[in-house]
Amino acid sequence: MSDTIVGRALWSDLVRQIAARTRNYDDAEDLLHTAYLKLVRYQAQTPVENIPAFLVRTAINANIDNCRHTKALKNVAITPQLEDSAPLQDEVVGARIRLGRTKAGLDRLPARTREIVLMHKLDGLKYNEIASRIGISASAVEKHMAKALLFLAQWTEGW
Amino acid sequence: MRRRLASSIAASEAAEWLARLRADDRSPADEAAFRAWLDADPGNAVAFDAVNAIWESVGALSRELRSEVIRSEQPKKVK
C-alpha cells in the first residue's frame, strides 16, 4: 500500500524538528498541520521536491507569522473596544475584529462541538484522544469538526 | 441563487475536507480524492481557502486564550 504524503514516522520526526527549531513545543504539531495543508493544497499546481524541508520551512514561517500576530495583539482585548484604545495600525484593528468575530462564532456553537474544537486546536489533542476522553467515536469527533468549520465559515462570510 | 447554492455546497465539502485532513488516519486515497475535488471546480479551492482562513483565526484565538490562562496563573506561581 502506498503511503500518505507524510508517513507516520516522518510526521513524528518533523514534529520534533519543528519543536526544536521554533522552541514552540505547544504548537509544533499544529504548525506541521498548517504546513501540511499548504502542501496538499498547492502540490497539485506546483510540484514540491524536498517535502520534509518544505514542511519544516513552512511551519517555521507560520510560527513567525503567529508570533508577530500575537505580539501585535498583545495587551489588546479580544472584544473590540476601538474607542478606548490608542490609534492602532489597520492590520491590528482588522486582526482584532476578526478574532472578536471568531470568538463570537465559537460561542454560538453547541457546547460539545465548541469543546471538541478547543480540545483539538487549543490543547492539541488528536481526534482519537478526544474521542476516548468524551466517549464518542473518532469519526463523530471529525463530524463535529466539520460542522464547526462550516458554521464558522458561514458566520464569517463576507467580512 | 444558483451560485449561492453552489458556494454553500463547496463550503460544506471544504469543511469536511479540512476535518478529514486533520485526522490522524487520513489515507493516500483521501489525499488523492482531495486533490481531485480541488481540481473539479475553481470554487472548491476558494471555499477551502476560506475555511482554512477561519481555522487559522481559531488558532490565533486559541493562542490568545492560552496566554490569558498563563497570565492568570503566573501571580500564583510567584508567591
Image (cartoon, coloured by chain):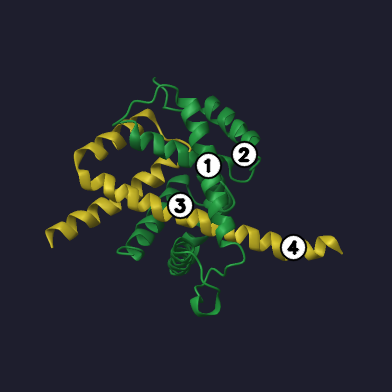
Chain colours: A green, B yellow
| 3 and 2 marks in contact (CB < 8 Å) | no
Q: At 57% from the left edge and 53% from the top edge, which residue is drawn?
A: A122
Looking at the image, is A9 positioned above or below residue B6? Answer: above
Residue B47 percent coordinates (x, y): 29, 50
* Residue that label 4 marks: B73
Q: Do the residues labelled 1 and 4 touch (CB within 8 Å)?
A: no
Q: Which chain carries label 2?
A: A
Q: Please name the residue that numbered disc 3 is placed on.
A: B56
Asked whether the residues under marks 2 and 1 belong to the same chain, the reply is yes
Earlier-in-chain disc, 4 versus 3: 3
Query: Which three-letter amino acid code belongs to the residue tagged 3?
Result: Glu
**Chain ID, mark 1:** A
Name the foreground residue: A73 vs A102.
A73
For marks 4 and 2, give the CA distance: 24 Å
Residue at the outermost bottom position: A83
Give the labeled residue for mark 1.
A31
Say what amino acid the circle numbered 4 marks.
Glu
- Residue at image point 48% right, 64% down: A89
Inspect the image, locate mark 2, and give the three-letter code of the amino acid beneath it: Thr
Three-letter amino acid code of the residue under disc 1: Leu
Mark 2–mark 1 distance (CA, rounded to whole Å): 10 Å
